[in-house]
Image (cartoon, rainbow, N blue to C red):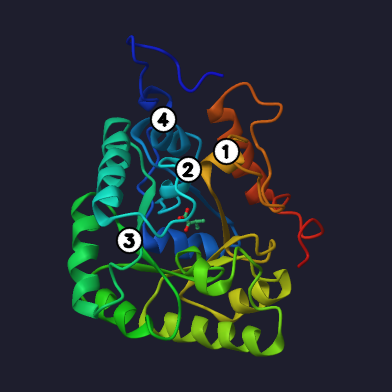
Amino acid sequence: MSISAPGTPYGTLPAASMPAARKPVSLPRLAEMRARGEKITMLTAYDATFAAVADAAGVECLLVGDSLGMVCQGLSSTVGVSLENMAYHMESVSRGLRRSQGTAWLLADLPFGTYHESKEQALRNAAVLMRAGAHMVKLEGGGWTTETVHFLVERGIPVCAHLGLTPQTVHSLGGYRVQGKSDSSAQILREQAIELEQAGASLLVLEMVPADLSAEITNTLKTCHTIGIGAGNGTAGQVLVLHDMLGVNLGKNAKFVRNFMQGQESVQAAFEAYVKAVKEGSFPDNTIHAW
Ligand code: KIV
């Protein structure tokens, strides 16, 4: 399996293949994409090389997710990931993009316990991730997070919210389960999404939410663009965990994941297939996970 063309004994980052005209991805650019109906693509990234290759394949957003606890560190949940872990991986990804003259929009997860005490704690820790190279921080949950989102956005830190299955609360949720199936839980998600948009969140990850509900939330929100994972194809964009979509992981892939490595000769080709499938609407397939 080739990752990139070797140039030194350690390989090169794929800057040479980058078209010169690519402009950095920004929030206004993501809003323009949404306005013209172009789907936004996001993948998780944890190191310099994969980040550079995903960027060269045209993935617009790279998320240094706290899923790194599970796929890089072998933990059984994201709860054990520290701020220092996040900053280390964020710096690696950011360096990879700098060296390859990449253009992707970079997000980093605020890990469990780093924004729960107060909005001041969230600001302090978000600043660590921004200094490590993030353009935006992501935090999980609705209701109690709204004030924090507003506080960060007012101070110049773009925020991606995350509703539905929020992995940091897996122990309270009783497992990795679909959220928003009952009328009352769907209504809570609708209300929290609107509050988060009003608080200034520019992106909203919807994880394991019924496809019709996530499409409805997407259409209600105007300045906050939804990014789905296991949430059907009615969202403004899609995200997958890197290892899952390459078919390499320690457990079983969730039903909604597609192995994009199948039939491809390189990791970059797998990323390109993902971008194409999301943009043309063939991934995800609503019939496979109509929760
Ligand atoms: O940590 C992560 O990788 C995430 C994605 C699943 C959205 O939050």
- C-alpha span from label 2 to label 1: 7 Å
Residue 17 picture location, percent across and down: 43, 25
From the viewer's perspective, tell me whether residue 105 is left or right of residue 179: left
- At mark 1, the secondary structure is loop
Instruction: Name the residue carrying label 1.
Output: 249
Q: Nearer the viewer, mark 4 or mark 2?
A: 2
| Residue 71: mark | 2
Badge 1 residue CB within 8 Å of ligand 1: no
Identified by mark 3, the residue type is: Met
Determine contact: label 2, label 1, CB under 8 Å: yes
Give the spatial CA distance, label 3 vs label 2. 22 Å
Which residue is rendered at x = 40% and y = 54% of the image? 66
**Amino acid bearing label 4:** Met
Q: Quadrant of the N terminus?
A: top right
Disc assigned to residue 18:
4
The reply to whether the C-beta atoms of the residues labelled 4 and 1 are less than 8 Å apart is no
User: N-terminal of the two: label 4 or label 1?
Assistant: 4
Front label number (4 vs 1): 1
The label number, if any, that marks residue 22 in the structure image: none
Asked whether 231 or 281 is in front, the reply is 231
At which x and y percent is residue 16? 38, 22
Picture quadrant where residue 30 is located: bottom left
Q: How crowded is mark 3: few (under 14 residues within 10 Å), some or many (20 or more)?
A: many
Amino acid type assigned to the residue bearing label 2 in the image:
Val
| Frontmost residue, 125 versus 239 | 125
Residue under label 3, please give it: 136
